[in-house]
Image: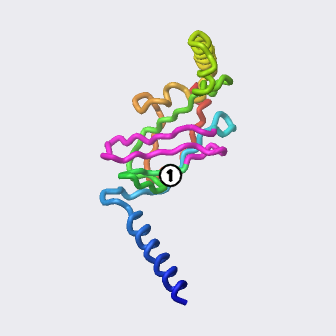
Amino acid sequence: MKKVSLLSLVVVMASALILGCSGKPSGFPKVSPCTITVTNGSDPIEGVDVALIPDTPISGVIVGGKTDASGVCVVKTTYANFSAPGSPEGTFKVQLRKDPEPTKPELTADDMASMDRSEIDKYNALRDAEIKSLPKVVPADLTSAQTTPVSVSVPADKEKAIDVAEFF
């Protein structure tokens, strides 16, 4: 009986400690749900880094996420090592990034150990040339907060769809 009581006490104390330390930090902004869907025509694009850049800077706050297999990014807000789903209220520029994926992978340390310097340089040059020749996944205009024409206003725009085909 004492073992059960002691175990229960340990579980309760650990839960209190975890819950007590995982609360929102002071200064964490109020957030509202926001999703960004990225497609190319009707095809979803997986793995796009989405950043919401506020018109009015919010010190220490990062807003964004990454698209899943269905092209949907559930936006999250991070501040002082605490994250929560949603975006602070305000107007944001939407910045997207995704590099094309080459067929040649980056060399690992083991790969390089078995190659001489000229072989490594040749491989990297071929890989770099392949990357340059691949079509862009995201148009250049959408990769910078200064050039993107896409914006979102939260909480009004809870869901934003971006078809990158419109910007090529």
Q: Of residues 116 and 55, which is closer to you in this image?
A: 116
Q: Can residue 99 be found in the magenta stretch? A: no
Q: Residue 50 in the image: x percent, y percent?
A: 51, 40
Q: How many marks?
A: 1
Residue 120 versus residue 22 in the image, above or below: above
Q: Residue at x 52, y 33 (%)?
A: 97
Identify the secondary structure beneath mark 1.
loop
Tell me where the magenta segment starts and ends, as one range.
Answer: 46-73
Q: Of residues 18 and 2, which is closer to you in this image?
A: 2
Horizontal side of residue 127 vs 92, given as left or right: right
Quadrant for the N terminus in the image: bottom right
Q: Can residue 68 be found in the magenta stretch? A: yes
Quadrant for the C terminus in the image: top right
Q: Residue at x 42, y 73 (%)?
A: 16
Q: Of residues 131 and 114, which is closer to you in this image?
A: 114
Amino acid beneath label 1:
Cys
Q: Residue 144 in the image: x percent, y percent?
A: 44, 30
Q: Residue at x 55, y 26 (%)?
A: 139
Judging by the rendered image, the residue that carries numbered circle 1 is 34
Q: Residue 45 in the image: x percent, y percent?
A: 63, 37
Q: Of residues 63 and 129, which is closer to you in this image?
A: 129
Horizontal side of residue 30 vs 49, given as left or right: left
Quarter of the image where one finds residue 100: top right
